Amino acid sequence: MSVFLETSRLTLRAFTDADVDHVLELHNDPEVMHYINGGSPTSRETFLREVLARFVHDRPCVGGRAFWIAQERDTGSFLGWFEFRPTADDSCETVELGYRLNRAAWGRGLATEGARALIRKGFTELGVLRVTAYTMTVNVRSRRVMEKAGLRHVRTFFEEWPHKIDGSEHGDVEYWLTRDAWQRQNTPTAPGTRRPFTGL
């Protein structure tokens, strides 16, 4: 098992063939997929043809894959996956953060825990300069994870997507966190002083 990182409750590791059924089940949960494709089902054939390639595509600048299976550290139970994907194959300067966890993992702070750990690893070990993330404007739960992980809203935008989803008329949002801002957030300040806010 190729472990990418561990937190107090999570192990993030490389995808294997044994994960296909778990990921396919995750991608067929209408609640999990509500803000992705409106909850439409994904066939095994479509998954193997279109989705699997993203999970096994190597990104040299991160030392391997960009999608990581998330499992509970103590029990080994499958929870979902995290994405920490360079926007260019040959550079880790900008990476996109993503996460998709099953309902058993919701409300436990696991998405935030995994996101923070990936961001730390990116900024301290992988040469990442900026982390970006996207979701629908109305996806309050995902936006909260981004904010707890330190990212800040930078724009709302509108695009045509293949799936019509309730709330899509409100557009999508992009969040950012730069390494400089992350370092400021994580640098202790002297007692009685305030650190100026910046998310960029």
Image (spheres, helix red, strand yellow):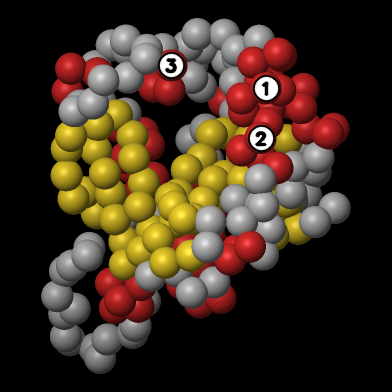
Q: Is residue 200 visible?
A: yes
Rendered position, 96 above or below 38: below
Residue 136 on image: x %, y %: 29, 29
Residue at image position (51%, 22%) is 32
Look at the numbered disc 3 and give the secondary structure of its residue. helix
User: Which mark, by number, is residue 37?
Assistant: 3
Element type where label 1 sits in the image: helix
Task: Describe residue 7's horizontal placement relative to residue 168 as left or right.
Answer: right
User: Which amino acid, mark 2?
Assistant: Ala
Asked if the residues shown at circle 2 and circle 3 are in contact, with their CB atoms under 8 angstroms apart, the answer is no
Residue of label 2: 53
* Image mark for residue 49: 1
The local crowd at label 3, few if under 14, some if 14 to 19, many if 20 or more residues have their Cα within 10 Å, is some
- Horizontally, residue 186 falls left or right of residue 152, namely right
Q: Residues within 10 Å of mark 1 (few under 14, many from 20)?
A: few
Instruction: Kindly give the residue lying farthest to the bottom in the view shown.
Output: 190
- Residue 113 visible in rendering: no
Is tag 2's residue or tag 3's residue first in the polypeptide sequence? 3
Q: Residues within 10 Å of mark 2 (few under 14, many from 20)?
A: few
* Mark 2 in CB contact with mark 1 (< 8 angstroms): yes
Nearer mark to the viewer, of 2 and 3: 2
Location of residue 45 in the rendering, given as x and y in whole percent from the top left corner:
71, 13
